[in-house]
Image: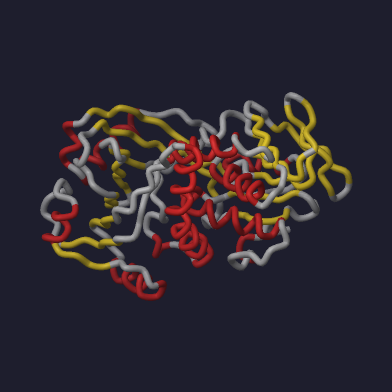
Amino acid sequence: MSEFLVVGGGVIGMMTTLQLADAGHSVTLLERGDCGRESSWAGGGIVSPLYPWRYSAPISRLSTWSEGSYPELALRLLEETGIDPEYRQKGLLYLRVDDEARAMAWARDVGKPLERVDTDFLYAKEPQATPGLVEALWMPTLGSIRNPRLVQALRARLAAMPRVTLREQCEVTGFERAGGRINAVRTASGAVSGGQVIVCGGAWAAGLLERVDVRLPVRPVKGQMILFKAPPGLVKRVVLMDGRYVIPRADGRVLAGSTLEECGFDKSTTNEARESLWQSAVTIIPALADCEVEHHWAGLRPGSPDGVPFIGTVPGVDNLSVNAGHYRNGLVLAPASTRVLVDLLLGREPILDPAPYRVAR
């Protein structure tokens, strides 16, 4: 029996497992499919909320802490697994921002190096950007990471750790509860016992917690994305305009996203979304019109009412915790949100005040 059972093998579940194992604890990770193949794989990998000045303080605090941890995490995973998560700190260009004054005020308040730049600076940084712009906003410190490589590296690291047991293709079907405790987690292949149970089920977290009569307001929100096969160097950094973005990869490929769709658990792609994403991408970078669309996919984000994740003990169940509801910012907030929960579980002083993230009774 492991000291901890983690339900859900996305980036939240895997980072939770890594931190607990690093602290010397035994952990069993249960994943309904393959680790890292849901929203953690599907996202774009910008290591910041898209427009950070539009988010609440609880999200900003998690984001700021996480941004600072990604360079070290990426280097660690490369050294330990040989898999490069491709963390790139090339900065981010914001085009056609309609609340620029708010953005600049936010940057002054939080000490971020956001600046207004002119047309010469803009096109020196991104020569292929849509022509005719006279200014932009520039955040030089923001980075991106390649989601599939990150989750591959996390999984490989966990698989090599003697205190970690990975159980993939192992869907959780319920919980064996006695009074105020969970005695075991039921799966299709039998019951699994553990000391503390942590639900990191993303869009599926609410359905899991319903089985212990806990109502968590987390819902699936579909996002579709496309990938262009572009020559290396066509796009040099993340460019954001009108709520859509393009993200370059080290091999030249350019990811464009994303949609926001309330479709339940439907992960199908649509021609309408493909056309909309293509149009947005070629508006931002016109030269992408000459590049092949290599892939088109969809993922399900764990939507929450205000985008603030639920982190902490589930009311009424002493040994059941949750970390879910990150909405569009699961990857962005993962290092900090998992650290807050692990601090609470291990009786350490949390890196951030956990009160804004508590699960309400």
Q: Quadrant of the N terminus?
A: top right
**Residue 208 seen anywhere in this rendered image of the structure:** no
Relative placement, left or right, of 98 versus 358 is left
Q: Is residue 356 above or below residue 211?
A: below
Q: Residue at x 55, y 36 (%)?
A: 155
- In the displayed structure, does residue 338 sit left or right of residue 327? right
Q: Quadrant of the C terminus?
A: bottom right
Residue at the top extreme? Answer: 189
The coloring applied to the image is: secondary structure
Residue 352, x across and y down, in percent = 59, 66
Residue that extends furthest to the front in the rendered view of this protein: 79
Q: Is residue 341 shown above or below 116? A: above
Q: Residue 332: horizontal and vertical position, in percent?
A: 46, 52
Q: Is residue 112 above or below residue 29?
A: below
**Residue 141 or 290: which is nearer the viewer?**
141
Q: How many dots with numbers?
A: 0
Q: Where residue 231 sits: x, y (%)?
A: 20, 34
Whole-percent x, y for residue 309 in the image? 57, 54
Residue 188 in view in this figure: yes
* Viewer-nearest residue: 349 or 260: 349
Name the foreground residue: 80 vs 115: 80
Q: Residue at x 21, y 61 (%)?
A: 136
Residue 97 quadrant? bottom left
The residue under the point 44% across, 37% down is 83
Q: Which residue sits at x=57%, y=41%?
A: 203
Horizontal side of 41 relative to 233 (left or right) equals right
